[in-house]
Amino acid sequence: MNRNEQPRLLAADEPPPFTIERERGRSPFVLICDHAGRRIPRRLGTLGVADDELQRHIAWDIGARGTAAHMADLLDAVLIAQTYSRLVIDCNRPPGVASSIPVISEATAIPRNENISQQERERRRREIFDPYHGRIDAVIDARVQAKRPTMLLAMHSFTPVYAGVARPWHIGTLYHRDTILPRLLLRHLRAEGDLVVGDNEPYAVSDLTDYTIPVHAEARGLISTGIEIRQDLIADQSGQRQWAERLARILGEIEAELKPERLA
Ligand SMILES: [Zn+2]
């Protein structure tokens, strides 16, 4: 090791920055879960944050991974999910923006993220952000090359109360440039009859606040949407299974409605 080189962030016995399941899945849907994990590299300790805070939504999207994994099984769709907490580096933020390595999340300070060196920023990007997005890129490249229909689904979950304000939605779509999939998904979700559905609520996609949809879908002209599910509905396994079953059924209907040429 060069004297000026930092030691690696992830130790040899720590898990890789992402997991991939059903890489050869037959579904046109590619499931991405940017905030699936809440692990922190051992070298960073607790980031200076209390343990109970690290269980909360500020560290990860509660329930999103379990729901996405059930959906992947039901749809036979590939799922790529991030292992490490968004408090280490947020994989749905362009590197370099303030919220990429946040010093505050909701009302919680993240002391170990304050005044960090450029080297430390680059190390987090190199070991966590880049390999994750590199793999997403490679999976999509291979599908495009094989002329396989591909639609990107970014799976998220949101806290029922943010900054003291209760949120009424059960589920929401989040999107920006794609006008095909979000519209279909909204129509199907509303037709369920028992759901309060957010249209770009509680969040919308933008180039400044998002990375995955703008870079992996919009820049390639792929059909895409984000899905946000309220965390209290998918906090346990039975909730995750129920929502996965409902969404897999709806996505199957949408797939059948879309003409094959629109998916190509
Ligand atoms: Zn999220």
Image (cartoon, rainbow, N blue to C red):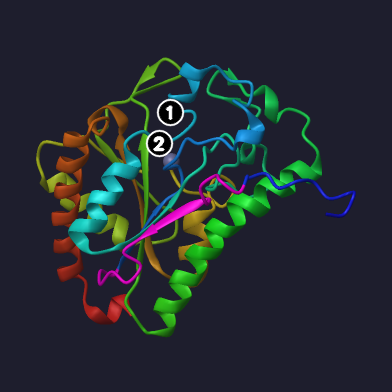
Position of residue 7 measured from the top left corner of the image (x, y, whole percent): 76, 46
Residue sitting farthest toward the bottom: 146
| Amino acid type indicated by mark 1 | His
Dot label at residue 61: 2
Determine whether 232 is above or below 256 in the image. above
Magenta extent: 12-28
Q: Quadrant of the N terminus?
A: bottom right
Position of residue 160 measured from the top left corner of the image (x, y, whole percent): 33, 24
Q: Is mark 2 within 8 Å of ligand 1?
A: yes
Please tell me which residue is depicted at 39% across the width and 77% down the height of the picture: 143
Q: Nearer the viewer, residue 151 or 50?
A: 50
Judged from the image, the quadrant occupied by ligand 1 is top left
Determine whether 149 is above or below 96 in the image. below
Please tell me which residue is depicted at 30% across the width and 75% down the height of the picture: 263
Q: CA distance from mark 2 to mark 1?
A: 6 Å
Residue sitting farthest toward the right: 3
Q: Secondary structure at mark 1?
A: loop
Count neighbours of disc 2 (C-alpha within 10 A) and say few if under 14, some if 14 to 19, many if 20 or more. many
* Tag 2–tag 1 contact (CB < 8 Å): yes
Instruction: Check disc 1 and report the residue beneath it.
Output: 57
Magenta stretch prevailing secondary structure: loop
Apparent side of residue 172 relative to residue 86 in the rendered image (left or right): left
